[in-house]
Amino acid sequence: MGSAAPSVVTIYLSLVEDYDREEYLRAGGEEPSPRSKVLIRFESRPPDEAGFYMPDDGELPRIFVYRSGFAEDPLHRAIDVARAATDPLGELIALSHELGHHELVLRGHGTGIFDRDRPIESYTEEAGAWFLARELLAKRGFVDWTEFDRRAEHSLKTYEEGLGLASDVTGAIRERSKALLTAAG
């Protein structure tokens, strides 16, 4: 008999512990922190957006996870805020997607910056971030793919419409992005 899949909360907390720079330092890590580390922050935002990735601009890259009604406090530890999530599945999916953007930048396949004047590149990066989020979660034993796929499709459809791209074009972009990232490992 196989072991049960880890809970959503367990996976969520493990991502925060593994990627948050402050948790790395608290665990005895030294500066400079590895490039894989980011500052994870939580902000109160309306529910129309789940998160945001801000690439390295002379500081450590940052990921913002948005939570409706969250009382912001700079003294909150990311891990403690994550433990108090009322929607851990939604926040896990948002965090994994933003980490996908971070991984694209680390691999040299993205900038982490949305550019309406470069719709193909912006859509390619968005599709790639969702692909890498799926890989990241699969490695950790995630099983709620129905909700993940629903959110990914909604996000990609929003990008497609907002950038004025035809669905046949975006379908081809998704396949090329997946092939490139699979080959690059």
Image (cartoon, grey):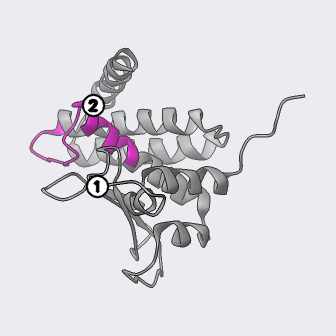
Residue in the image at 40% along x and 77% along y: 44
Residue in the image at 34% along x and 33% along y: 128
Q: Residues within 10 Å of mark 2 (few under 14, many from 20)?
A: few
Give residue 148's position: percent from left, percent from top.
55, 44
- Residue 148 vertical placement versus 13 (above, below): above
Residue designated by label 2: 107
131 horizontally vs 137: left or right: left
In this view, the residue in front, 38 or 129, is 38
- Residue 94 vertical placement versus 104 (above, below): below
Q: Quadrant of the N terminus?
A: top right
Residue in the image at 36% along x and 17% along y: 179
Task: Spot the residue most to the left.
Answer: 117
Total tally of numbered discs in the picture? 2
Q: Secondary structure at mark 1?
A: loop
Disc 1 marks a residue whose amino acid type is: Glu
Q: Residues within 10 Å of mark 1 (few under 14, many from 20)?
A: few
Indicate which disc, 2 or 1, sits on the residue closer to the N terminus. 1
Magenta range is: 99-119
In this view, the residue in front, 174 or 44, is 44
Give residue 122's position: percent from left, percent from top.
21, 40
Is 37 a magenta residue? no
Residue designated by label 1: 31
Q: Report which quarter residue 160 is drawn in.
A: top left
Q: Report which quarter residue 53 is drawn in.
A: bottom left
